[in-house]
Image (tube, rainbow, N blue to C red):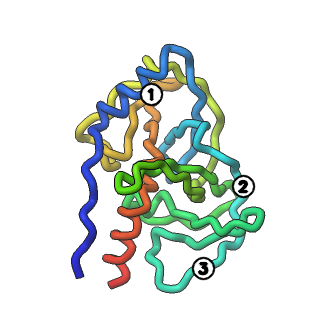
Amino acid sequence: MTSPKLPSFASPTAAQQALLAAGTDPQQYLTFYVGEEMFAMGILAIREIIEYHALTEVPLVPPLIRGVINLRGSVVPVVDLAVRFERTPRPSSKRTCIVVVETQHHDAALENTSPQKMGVVVDAVSEVLEIAPQAIEPAPEFGTHLRSDFIQGMAHIRQQFVVVLDIDRILWLPEIAVRSSLQTE
C-alpha cells in the first residue's frame, strides 16, 4: 500500500510573517499546559473549552485519537496533544480539558477551505493573554522538543518562553490519517 503524498508546508518563518501581517494590535491567545510545558494558540480558532469526561472510544484507531465526543449532536474527534507531540500521554485529572477548535484546511484539488471541528486534550488551561505580534519571535529551527512546523513562534511571557502553536498544521487531517494508518498496520 502506498501512502498519499503529503504536501510541503511553508516554513515557520512564513507563519511568523503572517503574524506580523496581522498588524501591531495585540492578539488574544489561550495558554495551556501539556505536561509541564506551556503552549498558546490563537483564540479565533477556539470554539469552546469543556471538561474532560468519558469519551466514546473508536476501535482500531491509534493512541493519537482518544475517541469522539457528542457536541450538540455533532461527532467531534478528540486528539491527544501529548501523543501528537510524540510524548507519553498522561492520565486525566480534574484539570484536564478538551479544547474544541475549528481548523481551516485548504484543499488544493477543490480550491476551497473546509472548516473541521476537533477536540484536543490538554492537561490544564491557564489563561487568555494578549500578545503583540512583534513580541512573537520566529520559531527556532532546532532545540525544541516539538516539530518546528507545529510552531508558529515563541512568545516571552513573564520570564518564560511560551510556544505559540500552529493548530491548523498540528491537526492537518491528511497527515493524521496517514500516521493513523501506519500505526494500525
Instruction: Kindly identify the amino acid type of the residue bearing the numbered disc 2.
Output: Ile
Which residue of the protein is positioned furthest toward the front in this rendering?
110
Apparent side of residue 111 relative to residue 95 in the rendered image (left or right): left
Q: Residue at x 43, y 42 (%)?
A: 166
Apparent side of residue 104 relative to residue 72 in the rendered image (left or right): left
Apparent side of residue 84 relative to residue 144 in the rendered image (left or right): right
Q: Residues within 10 Å of mark 2 (few under 14, many from 20)?
A: few
Q: CA distance from mark 1 to mark 2?
A: 26 Å
Q: Identify residue for label 2.
A: 50
Apparent side of residue 121 relative to residue 37 in the rendered image (left or right): right
Near-viewer residue (22 or 123): 22
Q: Residue at x 59, y 50 (%)?
A: 101
Near-viewer residue (12 or 5): 5
With respect to residue 171, does 4 lie above or below?
below
Q: Position of residue 3 (x, y in %)?
A: 25, 72
Which residue of the protein is positioned furthest toward the right in this rendering?
72
Instruction: Kindly identify the amino acid type of the residue bearing the numbered disc 1.
Output: Ala
Q: Position of residue 50 (x, y in %)?
A: 72, 55
Q: CA distance from mark 3 to mark 2?
A: 18 Å
Q: Identify residue for label 3.
A: 57
Callout 1: helix, strand or loop? strand
Q: Quadrant of the N terminus?
A: bottom left
Q: Position of residue 116 (x, y in %)?
A: 55, 56
Callout 3: helix, strand or loop? loop
Q: Residues within 10 Å of mark 3 (few under 14, many from 20)?
A: some
Q: Are marks 3 and 2 in contact (CB under 8 Å)?
A: no
Mark 1 vs mark 2: give the one in front.
2
Callout 2: helix, strand or loop? strand
Q: Residue at x 77, y 63 (%)?
A: 72
Q: Which mark is residue 155?
A: 1
Instruction: Kindly identify the amino acid type of the residue bearing the numbered disc 3.
Output: Glu
Q: Are marks 3 and 1 in contact (CB under 8 Å)?
A: no
